[in-house]
C-alpha cells in the first residue's frame, strides 16, 4: 500500500551533479519526516540527509554537508536530494525513507517505510 519510489540516479563524472527524486504514495506525506540513506557494496547503510514534515528544517551528514541539499514538495508527495560536486566516494545505492514520529530522524531503525533505491555511480 505504501510506496516510495526513487528515481534520478545514474552515471556521472566527479564534480558533476545529480538530483534524486522520491515519490510517495499510500500515506499522508506531510505527516512524515523524510530521509535519505546510501549503501555501498560491503559497507553499512549510511545516513545522508533528513527533512522535517513541512520542509522547514533539514539535517545533512557532515561528509556531504555543503555539497548535498534536500527539499520536499508536499503538494507533489515528493522529496528531493540535490547532489553537487560529486566524488567517487559518493557511489552507492541511495534510498529514501519515511518516519511518522520524529522531526529529523538519522537512524535507519527509526524509519517506517523504505524505497527500493536508485544507483548513483561517480567516475574519477
Image: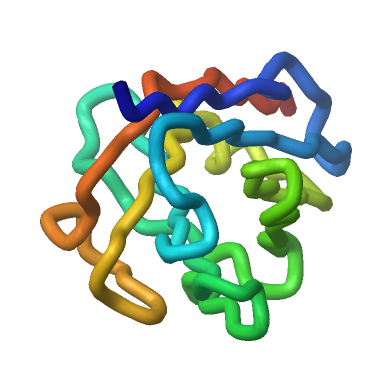
Residue at the extreme right of the image, as rendered: 16
Residue at image point 61% right, 75% down: 54
Residue in the foreground of this view, choosing between 63 and 36: 36
Residue in the foreground of this view, choosing between 92 and 34: 34
Up-down relation of residue 24 to residue 68 (above or below):
above
In the rendered image, residue 45, in percent from the top left (x then y), is placed at 26, 43
In the rendered image, residue 106, in percent from the top left (x then y), is placed at 31, 69
Up-down relation of residue 111 to residue 38 (above or below):
below
- Quadrant where the C terminus sits is top right
Up-down relation of residue 119 to residue 66 (above or below):
above
In the rendered image, residue 48, in percent from the top left (x then y), is placed at 47, 58
Residue at the extreme left of the image, as rendered: 109
Residue in the foreground of this view, choosing between 98 and 81: 98
- What colouring style does the render use? rainbow
- Quadrant where the N terminus sits is top left
Residue at image point 36% right, 50% down: 98
In the rendered image, residue 113, in percent from the top left (x then y), is placed at 27, 40
Residue at image point 20% right, 54% down: 108
Residue 78's image quarter? top right
Residue 107's image quarter? bottom left
Amino acid at each position: 500500500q505504501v510506496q516510495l519510489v526513487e528515481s534520478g540516479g545514474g552515471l556521472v563524472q566527479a564534480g558533476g551533479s545529480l538530483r534524486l527524486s522520491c515519490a510517495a504514495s499510500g500515506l499522508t506525506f506531510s505527516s512524515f519526516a523524510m530521509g535519505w540513506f546510501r549503501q555501498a557494496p560491503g559497507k553499512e547503510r549510511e545516513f545522508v540527509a533528513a527533512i522535517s514534515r513541512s520542509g522547514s528544517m533539514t539535517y545533512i551528514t557532515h561528509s556531504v554537508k555543503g555539497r548535498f541539499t534536500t527539499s520536499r514538495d508536499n503538494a507533489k508527495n515528493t522529496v528531493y536530494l540535490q547532489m553537487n560536486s560529486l566524488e567517487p566516494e559518493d557511489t552507492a545505492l541511495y534510498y529514501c525513507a519515511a518516519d511518522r514520529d520524529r522531526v529529523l530522524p538519522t537512524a535507519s531503525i527509526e524509519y517506517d517505510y523504505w524505497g527500493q533505491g536508485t544507483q548513483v555511480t561517480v567516475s574519477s
